[in-house]
Image (cartoon, rainbow, N blue to C red):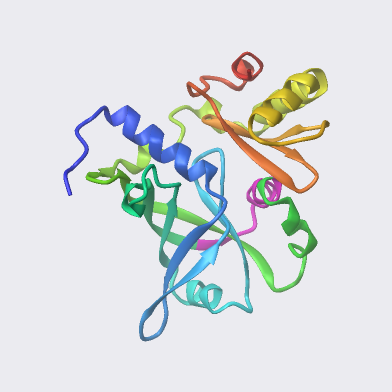
Amino acid sequence: MQELRESQNDIHREARLLLRAARVASLAVLEEDYPSIALVTPAVTLDGGVVLLLSQLSAHTRALDRDGRCALMVSGPAEERNPQTSPRLSLVCDAVRSEDAADRARYLAVHPYAGFYAGFGDFGVYRLSTIAARYVGGFARAASLDVERLAPVTVALRDEAAAAAAMAAVNAGQGGRLDRIAREQGGDGSGWQVIALDPDGYDLAREDVVLRVAFAHGLRTYADFSSQIG
């Protein structure tokens, strides 16, 4: 498979958009004798970290507690009949239990249905720190990525308070625009709200339905959010 020779900015942006939009992933862990794999539901924080809500009753969670080395793969839809034309991103990671309230809040924002069981005693949030990344943008398009470029490059874009303020302003004053955007994304009804915002896009929610909307161009500051939406 040939290495990608196109713009490195485009490659890393493609990978970021794929990761941030992913609502399901495959998690590979190290069992005592052999590797094993499990389906998980990721969320991505402002700084590009992956967070998972996992149960201690699951074998893959106990495996992570013994050895945090793992790998995560997310994929998008194939552009042709051949499944190998689908974009996918593989991350080599170290996983640790997270007690950070922001990690939990980000997870529950994009997976609101998980609020039903997130407080059960056997559940906890795990944060995956990426140490290597490999992106395949389709058939014969592959590249090893610079991990640092999968995360925001400025401190301002890691500011949870600024992101929250920008969301609140848009939700309070632009409800009609949000409903229109949701319809364009396949949603229905009214009352859509922005429930998560990051440098590459935002998530709209109504009840338990969440829609991901990517920006045409990434944000420079969260103050620009209002002007970026349709």
Q: Nearer the viewer, residue 140 or 147?
A: 140
Quarter holding the C terminus is top right
Secondary structure mostly seen in the magenta stretch: helix
Q: Is residue 143 left or right of residue 206?
A: left
Residue found at the far bottom of this picture? 33
Q: Is residue 103 left or right of residue 69?
A: right
Q: Residue at x 43, y 29 (%)?
A: 153
In the image, the segment drawn in magenta is: 96-109
Residue 123 among those drawn in magenta = no
Q: Quarter-wise, where is residue 192 in the image?
A: top right
Q: Nearer the viewer, residue 156 or 220?
A: 220
Residue 101 among those drawn in magenta = yes
Give coordinates of residue 136: x percent, y percent: 31, 46
Residue 198 visible from this viewpoint: no
Q: Is residue 30 left or right of residue 3?
A: right
Q: Quarter-wise, where is residue 148 in the image?
A: top left
